[in-house]
Image (cartoon, rainbow, N blue to C red):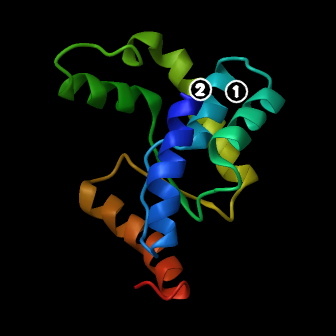
């Protein structure tokens, strides 16, 4: 996973950023911190070392965390899936730990994270995302 992320950083993310492009990335190194570290039990210093090897100093300017109640999230995932994925099969307790770990990260790095209530309708969620993203783009001269 870290080797794949490193390849993505080297061949996709850094060249796009060097060209002045806006980069949107799903599940970057915070996912490793949460799933393998906090929930999986790998020591945080090992996770951070792997992330440094994979990503160097490349840290997101903004992380949008779409948050909702675990039971509702599992219900929605089950409604759209044709079969249960390996993540849904891990049960509600696993997902509570994942959610809490992401919320803890968001609290620790509140300057980078924006937590959005994803239990609402799609237009409200999209509006909150735009409200978080647009001022940062404007400040960077990219809007």
Quadrant placement of the C terminus: bottom left
- Looking at the picture, tell me which residue is in the foreground, 135 or 67: 135
Local packing at callout 1 (Cα closer than 10 Å; few below 14, some 14-19, many 20+) is some
Residue 83 as seen in the image, left or right of residue 118: left
**Measured along the vertical axis of the image, is residue 126 above or below residue 90?**
below
Residue 33 as seen in the image, left or right of residue 90: right
**Measured along the vertical axis of the image, is residue 104 above or below residue 109?**
above
Q: Which residue is depicted at the point 45% across and 35% down?
A: 69
Q: CA distance from mark 2 to mark 1?
A: 6 Å
Label 2–label 1 contact, CB within 8 A: yes
Residue 1 tag number: none
**Measured along the vertical axis of the image, is residue 62 above or below residue 31?**
below
| Residue 127 coordinates in the image, percent (x, y) | 34, 69
- Looking at the picture, tell me which residue is in the foreground, 142 or 113: 142
Classify mark 1: helix, strand or loop: helix
Res 84 quadrant in image: top left
The residue that disc 2 covers is 35
Residue 38 tag number: 1
| Residue 114 coordinates in the image, percent (x, y) | 55, 60
| Residue 98 coordinates in the image, percent (x, y) | 57, 29
Classify mark 2: helix, strand or loop: helix
- Work out which residue is located at the far right of the displayed protein and give it: 45
Q: Which residue is depicted at the point 64% across and 62% down?
A: 112
Res 131 quadrant in image: bottom left
Q: Which residue is depicted at the point 48% across and 41% down?
A: 27
| Residue 74 coordinates in the image, percent (x, y) | 36, 25
């Amino acid at each position: 996973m870290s080797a794949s992320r490193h390849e993505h950083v080297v061949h996709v993310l850094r060249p796009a950023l060097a060209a002045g492009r806006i980069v949107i990335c799903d599940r970057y190194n915070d996912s490793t911190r949460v799933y393998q570290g906090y929930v999986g039990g790998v020591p945080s210093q090992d996770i951070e070392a792997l992330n440094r090897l994979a990503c160097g100093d490349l840290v997101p300017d903004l992380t949008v965390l779409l948050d909702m109640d675990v039971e509702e999230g599992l219900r929605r995932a089950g409604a759209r899936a044709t079969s249960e994925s390996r993540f849904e099969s891990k049960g509600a307790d696993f997902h509570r730990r994942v959610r809490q770990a992401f919320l803890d990260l968001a609290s620790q790095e509140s300057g980078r994270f924006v937590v959005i209530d994803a239990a609402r309708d799609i237009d409200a969620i999209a509006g909150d995302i735009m409200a978080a993203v647009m001022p940062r783009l404007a400040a960077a001269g990219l809007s």
